[in-house]
């Protein structure tokens, strides 16, 4: 990804190109759309706090219900923008709307932020059309969470005959049904699966001042905005009834008693049981003390990574997969250095003997996180863009070498293409003015407000970033982002590579542009995602894979090549390391290929008389076929 494309992805893609992320993203999270009358009372703000701070929920959009709906929508736009969630879009309920006053919190939307275009604006389409578009992104998988009257949802159901089939379920507050009883009856009669949070269940769900203080204690962008609304509300004892509705969506029902009942509504919006009515799930009772304690502990834990530094970990043995490797020695990949300059003098010990001809020294830059970090503040940073944004595994670790002066702290940050935001972790008490080795567990990284959850399997990432204070110095070398071997992988005896020369996963990017050579990238056929498939060598030649290394790779005395393969009709394969400039090469035969779906292979080469290569050839016989994945060229560790 070039710089222009990166800026689009980091700052615009997730909320300008479409109001909702593409289908298939964040599939592990429960997608929800929230319909709220925020501004009347404080309960909806505390519910949004839980929804946006959840590791298992994905808020796909928020709609405003209850006149003045436009003012509520602007309140939401300010709230979401100031909490670093510009990608979460807002829509206004179409008129007519039931009237509900915004009282003490009215100044939150009547503020320079929304008035002078510092925030996002509501979508042009009305709420019911916005909701329909969101449901169509993931048919049958999205939950609607109704935190106000059911006006917008009734219009949604009226506007499209297929809408009921698109909704996974609707979570309704019994206390809000009477606000628009006619709309509520349409919703109850729609046969959409319903969950009703009863008024009885919401009894005693108010926080005392000590609990409120703990909830607001993280002092992050998210909790500060809730604190602002709470100050304007100017009362004590915020209720958590609406937060209970959000908690239900997360799948954690430990504190709830849920009963299936056939219910209907009368003209006044009162619920009654009826044998002929559709069955709904009713949350009838809640362990109030336990739920409040769980809510408080979770929100209070959402602190900035800077306030909870990470510890260095062991590098471990041979990685399960190497997603990204960068030693800053190759000029082709220099195009992807987003911040930093070449360092050729102050290099790690042993540099110059086999590779390690260059490192990267940090230069001043703004933070790439323009959502939650201060965009005008400068840092000294090394930032590498691992084109073309690989998908992660379940155990993402990051290894690197560093040299510091003027600080003992590095903030390590990574961008999620899938989610459209950055996560970070902070390492402190590092030695200065000498080279050190560091490995961190990137699943500990969180957004600057403690939210976002850990990196997930299949989540695509982009920039790998190292920040320090602006007046200090940093040099980075030998970046390796990898999926660590499972702790119970007792059969993995190989040490971590001394130096990684090239990693080819073929999961993203184009053959030729990002993965040079002669082979075909085939989707949905790899050991993980995609794979490289053998092709004919010219018009008459036997099948082969010619894998280009994007430039010359300097070798040590010993070189190993590991990959995963799936062979069809092949019993052995000739593997050749090639320097196309000099014609020098080194060959070895991988024999007795396993006739299984996927197998692992490692080949060792004595390369003391081969200084560098730029291609690897895998040669087959006629009618043979080979799929290759997780292709790793490296200097073995001790």
Image (cartoon, helix red, strand yellow):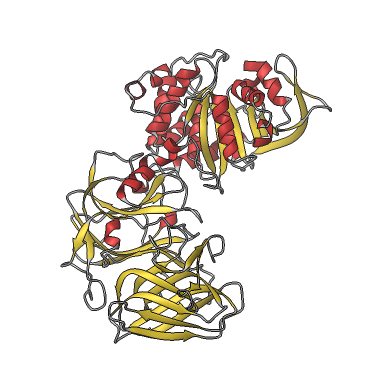
Identify the residue at horizontal 53%, vertical 82% (top origin): 621
Viewed as shown, does residue 619 lie left or right of 586? right
Q: Between 411 and 330, which is closer to the camera in this rendering? A: 330
Residue 495 is situated, as x and y percent measured from the top left of the image, at: 41, 76
- The quarter of the picture where residue 180 lies is top right
On the rendered image, what quadrant is the C terminus found in?
bottom left
Q: Quadrant of residue 337?
A: bottom left
Question: Residue 560 in the image: x percent, y percent?
Answer: 40, 79
Q: Residue at x 52, y 37 (%)?
A: 59
Viewer-nearest residue: 35 or 259: 35
Residue at 76% in and 23% down: 264
Residue 237 is situated, as x and y percent measured from the top left of the image, at 50, 25
Q: Residue at x 23, y 67 (%)?
A: 435
Furthest residue toward right: 275
Q: Observer-nearest residue: 142 or 177? A: 142
The image shows residue 359, relative to residue 422, as above or below, that is below
Q: Is residue 574 above or below residue 460?
A: below
Residue 258 in the figure: left or right of residue 537: right
């Amino acid at each position: 990804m070039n710089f222009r494309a990166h800026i689009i992805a980091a700052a615009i893609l997730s909320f300008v190109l479409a109001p909702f992320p593409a289908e298939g993203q964040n599939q592990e999270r429960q997608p929800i759309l929230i319909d709220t009358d925020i501004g009347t009372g404080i309960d909806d703000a505390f519910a949004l706090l839980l929804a946006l701070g959840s590791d298992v929920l994905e808020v796909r959009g928020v709609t405003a219900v209850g006149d003045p709906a436009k003012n509520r929508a602007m309140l939401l736009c300010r709230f979401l923008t100031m909490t670093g969630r510009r990608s979460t879009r807002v829509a206004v309920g179409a008129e007519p709307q039931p009237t509900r006053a915004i009282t003490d919190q009215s100044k939150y939307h009547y503020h320079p932020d929304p008035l002078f275009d510092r925030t996002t604006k509501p979508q042009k389409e009305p709420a019911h059309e916005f909701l329909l578009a969101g449901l169509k992104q993931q048919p049958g998988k999205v939950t609607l969470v109704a935190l106000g009257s059911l006006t917008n949802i009734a219009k949604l159901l009226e506007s499209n005959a297929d809408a009921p089939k698109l909704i996974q379920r609707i979570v309704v507050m019994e206390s809000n049904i009477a606000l628009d009883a006619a709309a509520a009856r349409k919703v109850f009669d729609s046969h959409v699966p319903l969950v009703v949070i009863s008024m009885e269940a919401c009894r005693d769900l108010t926080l005392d001042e000590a609990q409120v203080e703990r909830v607001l204690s993280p002092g992050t962008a998210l909790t500060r905005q809730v604190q602002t609304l709470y100050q304007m509300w100017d009362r004590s004892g915020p209720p958590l009834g609406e937060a209970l509705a959000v908690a239900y969506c997360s799948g954690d029902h430990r504190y709830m008693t849920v009963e299936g009942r056939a219910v209907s509504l009368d003209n006044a919006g009162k619920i009654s049981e009826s044998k002929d009515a559709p069955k709904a799930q009713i949350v009838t009772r809640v362990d109030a003390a336990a739920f409040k304690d769980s809510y408080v502990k979770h929100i209070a834990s959402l602190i900035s990574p800077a306030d909870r530094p990470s510890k260095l970990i062991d590098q471990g043995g041979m990685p399960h997969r190497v997603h990204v490797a960068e030693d800053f020695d190759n000029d082709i990949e220099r195009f992807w250095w987003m911040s930093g300059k070449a360092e050729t003098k102050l290099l790690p010990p042993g540099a110059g003997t086999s590779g390690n001809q260059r490192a990267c020294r940090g230069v001043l830059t703004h933070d790439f996180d323009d959502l939650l970090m201060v965009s005008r503040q400068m840092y000294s940073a090394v930032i590498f863009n691992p084109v073309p944004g690989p998908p992660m595994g379940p155990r993402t670790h990051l290894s690197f070498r560093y040299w510091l002066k003027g600080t003992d702290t590095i903030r390590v940050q990574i961008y999620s293409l899938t989610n459209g935001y950055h996560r970070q972790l902070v390492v402190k008490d590092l030695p200065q003015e000498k080279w050190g080795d560091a490995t961190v567990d990137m699943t500990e990284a969180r957004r600057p407000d403690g939210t976002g959850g850990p990196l997930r399997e299949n989540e695509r990432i982009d920039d790998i970033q190292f920040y320090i204070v602006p007046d200090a110095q940093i040099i980075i070398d030998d970046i390796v982002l990898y999926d660590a071997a499972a702790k119970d992988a007792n059969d993995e005896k190989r040490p971590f590579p001394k130096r990684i020369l090239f990693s080819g996963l073929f999961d993203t990017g184009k053959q030729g542009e990002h993965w040079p050579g002669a082979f075909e990238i085939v989707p949905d056929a790899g050991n993980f995602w995609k794979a490289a498939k053998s092709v004919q060598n010219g018009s008459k030649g036997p099948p082969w894979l010619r894998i280009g290394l994007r430039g010359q790779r300097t070798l040590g005395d010993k070189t190993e090549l590991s990959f995963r393969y799936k062979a069809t009709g092949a019993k052995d394969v000739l593997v050749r390391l090639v320097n196309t400039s000099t014609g020098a090469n080194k060959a070895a035969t991988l024999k007795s290929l396993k006739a299984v779906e996927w197998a692992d292979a490692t080949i060792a080469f004595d390369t003391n008389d081969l200084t560098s290569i730029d291609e690897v050839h895998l040669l087959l016989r006629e009618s043979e076929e080979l799929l290759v994945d997780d292709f790793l060229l490296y200097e073995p560790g001790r």
